[in-house]
Amino acid sequence: MTVLPALSGSCRVHAPQRILLMGRDLDQWRMILAHFTQPGEKGDLSLFHVDEKSWNEEDLRTFQVALLDYETLSPFQLRMVPALKQKMPHAPVLMCVATQNVDRVLGSFGNALDDWVIKDKGYERLLPERIRWVCRKTVKGQDFLNQSLQFFQEAQRMQALGIFASGIAHDFNNVLSMIFGHTQMALMALPQDSPVRSHLAQSLTAGNRAKELVKEIFTISRHEKGGAQKVQAGMVIKEAVKFLKAAIPSTINIHQNLKLQPTGWDTVLCDASHIYQILLNLCTNAVNAIGSDQYGSLTIEFFPHEVSPQGEGTPGSPAPGRYAALKVSDDGRGIPGELMNRIFDPQFTTMDDGKSAGMGLTIVKELVEEHKGSISIQSQVGRGTVVTVLLPCVAMMSSVRASDDGGSIPTGTERVLFVDDEEMLVQVGELMLRKLGYEVAGFGDSREALKTFEAEPEAFDLVLTDLTMPNLSGFDLVRKCLEVRPDLPIIVCTGCGDSGTLERLKEAGVRGFLRKPFIIKLMAQTIREALD
């Protein structure tokens, strides 16, 4: 998305601060909208030009008006015009059009537009006032414009926190890998009757809990764009509830009933952060309905749900199949029956004290529908509200080995090239591999590792490499090694690899995956599977 420099000056009454632009070129839009501001006054106007490469549906909710120029729209932008009203129900869409094309525009896009402007002589000077007028006309008003800007700022803040948390989790996972490695080596060196073994075993048990916490932080904080991933929804919800408990007033009792076993039944195809956002918005609505200074109860349930073919065809009913169901219940004020048909309107709220922006359920509905799910609400005045979200389940994916599945520890004598950018992890990896009988060459610099391999590619029987490394990533190292030796067995180690990345690595020729921190038995089994 191309961002034009902010125009200095004040956005007058009902003037949006974030405008989505389609068509024309950037300089032309900047010249036209320079009339939007008055020099010497405070405030900024941000313009965002969107084309095929920069199209991002998640960002559309943050814009306050869309401005289009019909004659200069690209084929892709023309196709996206109807989608604007679906993805931006809160914001007016205004089209600039030449006189001879008005009938064509109204025939093709009439339902997708809030207004249009004929491009006659001098229309550029009238356009800013027309934008202000359409903003007033579409009910959103200045209050909503301010609220949507606050929503954007909050989204940016949460994204920054997610990136920060992910970075901390990555570093902590590396430290945990060193602790795991040395503890396992110590256990293997001790006799079976040593009293020290129980203490080290307890350390490993605590380490496993820390490993799961790191995995959950990765899941919640991950913000990859460009496609859904297979995620265990229950794990995300379980960790999100922990965070919510700290944020919800102590006067509100939180009850939870999460069906998390057997592992994997709750695998859904989505962005994990969206699950977190859905639960956060539903719980925020529930707290507002109860009152932050009132006593009440909030119940969070998660369970499998089957939709039978008998209900197929009923308006609003989900398609037959298996679903992961999230139910959030409160004993707050409830919603009057005559208002139920407005609960998904962007500006609707039952709060009369200005505490709610009214966007919570709108966002939840958009996210749920984006993931082919459904949402239903039952409410009774004075009794409370129950919101049920259904997300379709998919087949579980288990491409990364992370737990011990029993059996003996296989060994070998082959030559292994071990690569990780953490020197202490290289040392631990070398110790573990030598304990298993392998000859090891360890490298903390992936570029040096590649040079060594290219100089003597037949000197190694297997490459075991980290995924996230500076200068030359694990993905690039894999690609370059396989260019030299297409039959080379390669195992990739990762603490946070998403399913999309793992699938691409598998397609590139990677034979196995290991999740950090290493469990020596899993490492041994995965190596033998790759070699044999």
Image (cartoon, rainbow, N blue to C red):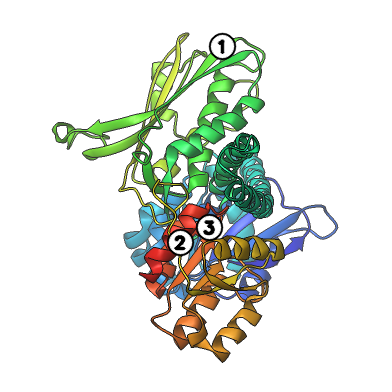
For residue 387, which quarter of the picture?
Answer: top left
Q: Is residue 423 left or right of residue 404?
A: right
Residue for point 51% across, 84% down: 459
- Residue 224's label in the rendered image is 3
Residue 321's place in the image compared with 414, above or below, is: above
Report which residue position mark 2 lands on: 513
Give coordinates of residue 202: x percent, y percent: 61, 35
Measured Cα–Cα span from mark 1 to mark 3: 37 Å
The quadrant of the rendering that contains the N terminus is bottom right
From the viewer's perspective, is the residue at label 3 or at label 2 nearer?
2
How many neighbours does mark 3 have within 10 angstroms: few (below 14), some (14-19), or many (20 or more)? few
The answer to whether residue 197 is seen in the rendering is yes
Instruction: Return the mark for residue 390.
Output: none
Q: Amino acid at mark 3?
A: Glu
Q: Describe the element under mark 2 as helix, strand or loop.
A: strand
* Mark 3, secondary structure of its residue: loop
Q: Is residue 349 visible?
A: no
Whole-percent x and y of residue 354?
Answer: 65, 26
**Which is closer to the viewer, label 1 or label 2?**
2
Residue on which disc 1 sits: 296
The foreground one among 316 and 429 is 429
For the residues labelled 1 and 2, say whether their Cβ atoms are less than 8 Å apart.
no
Residue 167 is situated, as x and y percent measured from the top left of the image, at 67, 54
| Crowdedness near tag 1: few (<14), some (14–19) or many (≥20) residues, C-alpha within 10 Å | some
Q: Residue at x 51, y 50 (%)?
A: 92
Mark 1–mark 2 distance (CA, rounded to whole Å): 47 Å
Do labels 1 and 3 touch, CB within 8 Å?
no
Ranked by sequence position, the earlier of labels 1 and 2 is: 1
